Each structure stands twice: as structure tokens, then as C-alpha cells.
Image: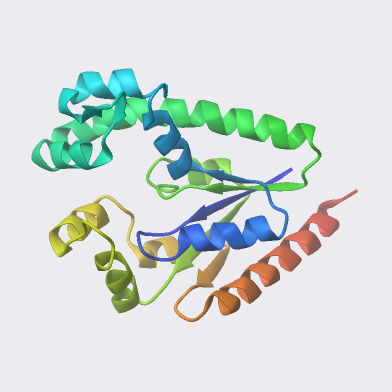
């Protein structure tokens, strides 16, 4: 089974692109969604993250806004948080992969914002990077509730630069134009991957 790794910096349109792959029948594992679920009341990350940042425990779950503020004030806690969250996400990803294999999927997509930063690029067969012009990226992100330039810059310092991601990609999806244009690019990627699959069959 072919594993596609989808990544892209904040504001590049990665989530929309993942949905376009899903439209074409590709099972998608969303790492961000997995983390959100683990932070919800009853989630497996709640207790260990609350031990790291007690103030983030709100209503039985982890308040990501409070956690973000804590990390801004205590950046040294980023590695501690990653040591908690990454293994939990890996366990969920493994379960997703096992289920997809059981259902006979010929390919799956891992939607992983920190694909390169976490070393997951070595564990996928194909890398697809979602990209857009820098001015479009910043405009998209700064339009979000609670976002400001300082926070965006902090996020970007923890992400591999877009140019570096593109240089390591097998395919680049440019989302600077319309969703329909991105959909066409995704369709072309899937056609190329089907051809690759046919070429590698005995």
C-alpha cells in the first residue's frame, strides 16, 4: 500500500487539499484532528498535558489557547509536549493504517503539518507539499480569529521553510488560485500515482 505524506506550512491550504484527496476516495489520517480529539475531555493526552501545563485544563479537556500562551512564555516546554503528543499520534496513525489495509485501500494519505520536522518523511512513499505565495499565506492566517503577526511568526519559526519543503517534494500543489484549480492538480497527482503503481506491479 502506497503511503502519501501531505504537508505544508500554516495557511497554505493543506486541510482543503487533504479534503480533495478524500473526495477521490483516498483514506486520510489528519494529525491535527487526532491531536484535537486527544485534547478533548476523555482524550488520552489530557492528563499528561495537564501535568505539563495545569492552567490548560479547562472543562475536562485541554484549552489550546492557554497551552499556546504557556508555550510562548516557556518555549523550553515544546520538547516535553512533543514527547507526550507524538507517540500518541503515532499509535493512532498505526491503527488507521491497519484499518485501511484491512479494507483493501491501495493508498492512504497522512496529513502531517510537521512531516519533515518529526522525521515522518522517511516513513512515507510519496511527499506532496501544499504551497502558496507568501502574501497569500500571511493574509489567510492573519484573517483567523485570535491570530496576529507575532503569533504567526512564532509558528513559522517551528516549521521548515516553504522553499525547503518544495525542494523535497515529489509533487507540489499550488493553492494560490481556486479550489477547482487545486482539485485539478490533485487529480493529476492521483493519475501519476496510479501509473506508478501499475509500473511497479510484477
Q: Residue at x 31, y 18 (%)?
A: 47
Answer with left or right where residue 131 lies relative to residue 29.
left
Q: Give the image's coloring scheme.
A: rainbow
Residue lying farthest front? 59
Q: Residue at x 69, y 52 (%)?
A: 26
Q: Residue at x 21, y 23 (%)?
A: 52
Q: Residue at x 34, y 25 (%)?
A: 84
Closer-to-camera residue (54/11):
54
* 181 vs 144: above or below: below
Answer with left or right where residue 124 lies relative to residue 72.
right
* 185 vs 101: above or below: below
Answer with left or right where residue 89 lies relative to residue 53.
right
Q: Is residue 79 visible?
A: yes
Q: Is residue 169 visible?
A: no
Based on the displayed image, in which of its 4 quarters is residue 55 positioned?
A: top left
Residue lying farthest right? 202
Residue 126 coordinates in the image, percent (x, y): 61, 54
Residue 193 coordinates in the image, percent (x, y): 73, 60
Quarter of the picture containing the N terminus is: top right
Residue 184 coordinates in the image, percent (x, y): 65, 75
* 98 vs 181: above or below: above
Residue 194 coordinates in the image, percent (x, y): 78, 60
Closer-to-camera residue (17/75):
17
Numbered disc total: 0
Amino acid at each position: 500500500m502506497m503511503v502519501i505524506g501531505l504537508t505544508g506550512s500554516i495557511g497554505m491550504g493543506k486541510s482543503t487539499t487533504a479534503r480533495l484527496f478524500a473526495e477521490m476516495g483516498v483514506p486520510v489520517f489528519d494529525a491535527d484532528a487526532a491531536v484535537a480529539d486527544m485534547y478533548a475531555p476523555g482524550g488520552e493526552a489530557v492528563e499528561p498535558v495537564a501535568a505539563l501545563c495545569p492552567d490548560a485544563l479547562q472543562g475536562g479537556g485541554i484549552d489550546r489557547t492557554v497551552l499556546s500562551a504557556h508555550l510562548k512564555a516557556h518555549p523550553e516546554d515544546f520538547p516535553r509536549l512533543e514527547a507526550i503528543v507524538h507517540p500518541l499520534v503515532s499509535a493512532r496513525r498505526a491503527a488507521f493504517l491497519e484499518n485501511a489495509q484491512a479494507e483493501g485501500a491501495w493508498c492512504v494519505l497522512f496529513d502531517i503539518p510537521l512531516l519533515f520536522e518529526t522525521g515522518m518523511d522517511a516513513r512515507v512513499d510519496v511527499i506532496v507539499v501544499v504551497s502558496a505565495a507568501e502574501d497569500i499565506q500571511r493574509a489567510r492566517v492573519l484573517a483567523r480569529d485570535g491570530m496576529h503577526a507575532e503569533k504567526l511568526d512564532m509558528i513559522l519559526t517551528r516549521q521548515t521553510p516553504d522553499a525547503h519543503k518544495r525542494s523535497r517534494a515529489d509533487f507540489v500543489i499550488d493553492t494560490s488560485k481556486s479550489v477547482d484549480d487545486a482539485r485539478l492538480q490533485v487529480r493529476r497527482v492521483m493519475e501519476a500515482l496510479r501509473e506508478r503503481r501499475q509500473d511497479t506491479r510484477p
